Image (cartoon, helix red, strand yellow):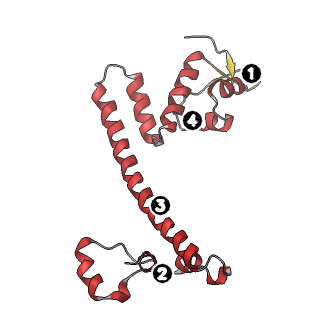
Amino acid sequence: MNKPILTIGHLSQQTKCTVPTIRYYEEIGLLPQSERVSNGHRFYRHEDIQRLLFIKRCRDFGFPIEQVRQLGQLLEDGERACVEVRDLAQRHLDEVRKKIVEMRELEKTLNAYVCACNTGCVEGQTKDCSIIETLQAPVIPQRRPEDSIQLATNPDSFSVTELKRGR
């Protein structure tokens, strides 16, 4: 194994990872504990740079800590099937796609709020703002397709957002 060569500050600079984050990754076991000299300073090896860059890249892709841990274990045990890595990445991709759908719905709703404000109250005071009014309204549960008949026969069941969208 290589001789320790880097302080935590140098490791931080080389990896563009903050010192508190490096300490945290050590604390939770993603990054091996550093060697310490008599004055308590931490020193790191070249392998630690590579491991930290790997962790950082996984986090940049949004992998949760536990999946980063699993990927790290698969990296260390280079004899396991690549399909395990692929399956982890596929699960994460499925979650990302789900979040994209949720974010698109959020975008549509916020756009409707802004459009309603632009057409109805943008020149007025905040006490009359349709966005604030909508945000103060009680939350109405999401409807399922089979609820559409009830919606057509019960106009009082529409939410503020749906009314402003012209539904």
Distance between mark 1 and mark 3 Cα atoms: 55 Å
* Residue lying farthest to the top in this orientation: 2
Q: Point out the tag, 4 or 3, that comes first from the N-terminus.
A: 4
Residue 38 circle label: 1
Marks 4 & 2, CB-CB < 8 Å contact: no
Circle 4: residue type: Tyr
Residue 138 circle label: 2
Distance between mark 4 and mark 2 Cα atoms: 41 Å
Residue 25 circle label: 4
Front residue of this view, candidates 111 and 31: 111
**Dot 2 lies on which element?**
loop
Q: Residue at x 32, y 19 (%)?
A: 79
Query: For mark 3, what is the residue?
Result: 107
* Residue lying farthest to the front in this orientation: 119
Mark nearer the viewer, 1 or 3: 3
Q: Residue at x 62, y 25 (%)?
A: 34
Q: Point out the tag, 1 or 3, that comes first from the N-terminus.
A: 1
Circle 3: residue type: Glu
